[in-house]
Amino acid sequence: MKIQSLLIFGLWGLLGFHTSLDAQPQVIAHRGYWQCDGSAQNSLASLKAADRIGAFGSECDIYLCADGELMVFHDPDITIDRQKISLENSSSAILKNYPLKNGETMPSFDQYLATLKQCRTTRLIIELKSIALTEARQTELARKTLDKVRQAGLEDRVEYIAFSLYLCQELHRLDPQAQVAYLNGDLSPRQIKKRGLTGLDYHMDVFRSHPRWIRQARKLGLRTNVWTVNETDDLRYFIDQQVDYISTDQPERLQRLLKERLSQ
Ligand code: MG
């Protein structure tokens, strides 16, 4: 009986040990790795920097412009000559000259994918933005994004996220193999699963107020991603919660904390 208990305990310990190793969250550089020399949010340099430090993923934001082109930028509008211009209502010809803080100009999605191809291992987490797009335009955005990724042969290197449930469902409908996570925080893991999506990418307050969702998601085979976690205490909390991905503006800080945790 004693030997049996020891064996069971030993096996449990071994499994537990493996679980804690396997369950280390992956590092996602939010808007690329931009808090380093020569970088800026959503710049090509930020994608290369995320790859250079070995971040598992680099997140970016994309818009469908009035002329049907896809551009990479976070804010919904820019100011040129004191005029506010909405990205969704302007042509990419105007946007592509807009300067970023590191001296680059606003990249197109084509340029971003070409840069991803040169990266060693990092994956691209693509946030599809929809501020005032009709459903037909959202479908166009989903279709164009998937087409460009397919043409570049990068299907295995990207994942998709969006606040719009319609956009998420269109991505899934157009490519049932695509990894699609919902950002808006108002659906439970079961509701996400029912819609055929593959993950929840929620603000940290949502996961804090629904602590069971992380485990429920894992049981359903869904991936969990939390944003945007920068402070050491918060990073430690979500490392302990064993989410799949942590999106952060401090990817090197998170890497250090993960290393520390492994050596404990
Ligand atoms: Mg984003």
Image: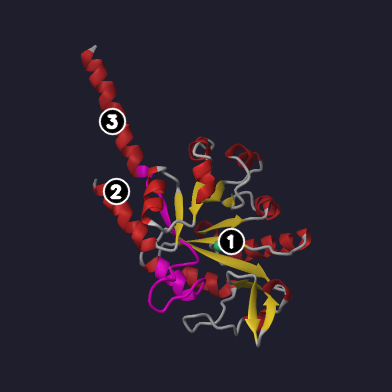
Q: Which segment did they paint magenta?
A: 22-50
Say whether residue 49 is magenta.
yes
Which residue is rendered at x = 72% and y = 61% of the image?
A: 138
From what the image shows, is residue 136 above or below residue 201?
A: below
Which one is nearer the viewer's eye here, 259 or 126? Answer: 259
Q: CA distance from mark 2 to mark 1?
A: 30 Å
Q: Element at badge 1?
A: strand
Can you tell me which quadrant of the image ligand 1 is in?
Answer: bottom right
Residue named by callout 1: 127
Can I make out residue 168 in this image? Answer: yes
Residue named by callout 2: 261
Residue named by callout 3: 13
Q: Amino acid at mark 1?
A: Glu
Q: Amino acid at mark 2?
A: Arg
Q: Are marks 2 and 1 in contact (CB under 8 Å)?
A: no
Among the two numbered marks 3 and 2 on one chain, the one whose residue lies closer to the N terminus: 3
On screen, residue 160 versus residue 53, left or right, reads right
Among the two numbered marks 2 and 1 on one chain, the one whose residue lies closer to the N terminus: 1
On screen, residue 241 versus residue 197, left or right, reads left
Which one is nearer the viewer's eye here, 162 or 69? Answer: 162
Viewer-side label of 2, 1 = 2
Q: Element at badge 3?
A: helix
Please name the colour scheme applied to the rendered image: secondary structure
Q: Residue lying farthest left?
A: 3
Quadrant showing the C terminus: top left
Number of dots carrying numbers: 3
Ligand 1 within 8 Å, label 1 CB: yes
Can I make out residue 223 in this image? Answer: no
Ligand 1 within 8 Å, label 3 CB: no
Q: CA distance from mark 3 to mark 2?
A: 18 Å
